[in-house]
Amino acid sequence: MLLTVGAFLAVACFWNSLVHGPVMLFIGFFMLRLFGQGSMTLIPNTLVPQWFVLKRGRALSFMAIGGFLSSASFPPLNTWLISSFGWENAWRILGMALIIVFLPVVYFVVKNKPEDIGLLPDNAVSKKRLERREEKLEEEEDKSFEVNWTVKEAMKTRAFWLILFCVSIPALVNTGLTFHLFSILGEQGVPGSTAAIILSIMAIVGFPVTMVSGFLLERVHVHIVLGLSFIGQIIFIVLLTQVQCYSLAIVFAVIWGVIGGFERITLNIIWPNYFGREHLGSIKGIATTTMVIGSAFGPLPFGIAFDFFGGYTEILLMILIFPILGSIAAFLSPPPQKQT
């Protein structure tokens, strides 16, 4: 899948280098969203949990380093490419980088899961046992290691639907806030430069929190952390309605970054922890679809509310219903028990 999606993402880059009208632009952005932000988020978040169970939290934390580095480096890199070579050639350079660098690395380095090369997650197989290939013993150990659910089995549990609802909330709320942040703060007398600083602080604070949260989630029940993160979301949304000076804006950015750091790992680790690795791709595909739908509709109520009320205070207070319900759903969603 990484090879296929990576190749199509390269095609999307080459396509966007030729855009000369709204139809081609729509198709280009559709492909970027499908193969880039959608698939390239789903696949690694499914791949890494295949390799770790006991140390899954810290593995996802280390994986997040790549996301932070790319978020920090690509905007200036793209700006330099465009100014030096033009936007058309910038797209082509990115497409060639995918073909020359990314695809070979995937082909020669990436393995789907440890069982494909005679191992178990967390390097749980000793060399002697691997050499003896005691298949029966390994199967028994693997069964005791985790419980795997099919999509149909997972959909019959209460936890699946409650967590699916929880997954949609950060996507909806955070996307809506990010899209309208400059307008929200501008309405409250905060300059646009401060809004830009908020986004930077949020990312900077979120990085160490993401690292810590992965280790924490190896020791604390994931649904408890998820429920607490929604309480934190309630706090920073209420605070946003009161941000009228630089100091409060900084406090808001820090709290938003802390909660975002916990959410990032929690929402990735909960699916393999609850339903195992065997059918993780199908289950996370449903979750990712829900997140994309949530992020797509997130900015809409803010825009409608601004046109209707002439401001954002009302929609910020109304949107609180989602993290309130999310916290309840999370606390009511302990890991399901599979009947054998």
Image (cartoon, grey):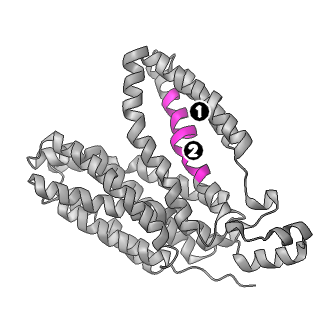
Question: Left of 310 or right of it: where is 24?
Answer: right
Earlier along the polypeptide chain: callout 1 or callout 2?
Answer: 1
Seen at 43% across and 53% down, the residue is: 294
Seen at 22% across and 45% down, the residue is: 197
Looking at the rendering, which quadrant does residue 173 occupy? bottom left
Question: Left of 35 or right of it: where is 299?
Answer: left
Residue under label 2 = 40
The location of residue 240, given as percent across then percent down, is 19, 58
The location of residue 90, given as percent across then percent down, is 47, 21
Residue 325, compared with residue 186, is above or below; it is: below
Magenta segment range? 27-44
- Assign the magenta stretch its main secondary structure: helix
Q: Secondary structure under badge 2?
A: helix
Residue 40 visible, this angle: yes
**Mark 1: few, some, or many residues within 10 Å (few <14, many ≥20)?**
many
Residue 191, compared with residue 334, is above or below; it is: above
What's the residue type where badge 1 is placed? Leu
- Residue 9's disc is 1
CA gap between label 1 and label 2 equals 9 Å
Which image quadrant: the N terminus? Answer: top right
Does the magenta-highlighted stretch encompass residue 55?
Answer: no
The location of residue 254, given as percent across then percent down, is 25, 59
Residues at circles 1 and 2 in contact by the CB criterion of under 8 Å? yes
Question: Left of 321 or right of it: where is 271?
Answer: right
Looking at the rendering, which quadrant does residue 193 occupy? top left
Seen at 58% across and 66% down, the residue is: 56
Q: Residue furthest front?
A: 128
Which image quadrant: the C terminus? Answer: bottom right
Residue 325 visible, this angle: no
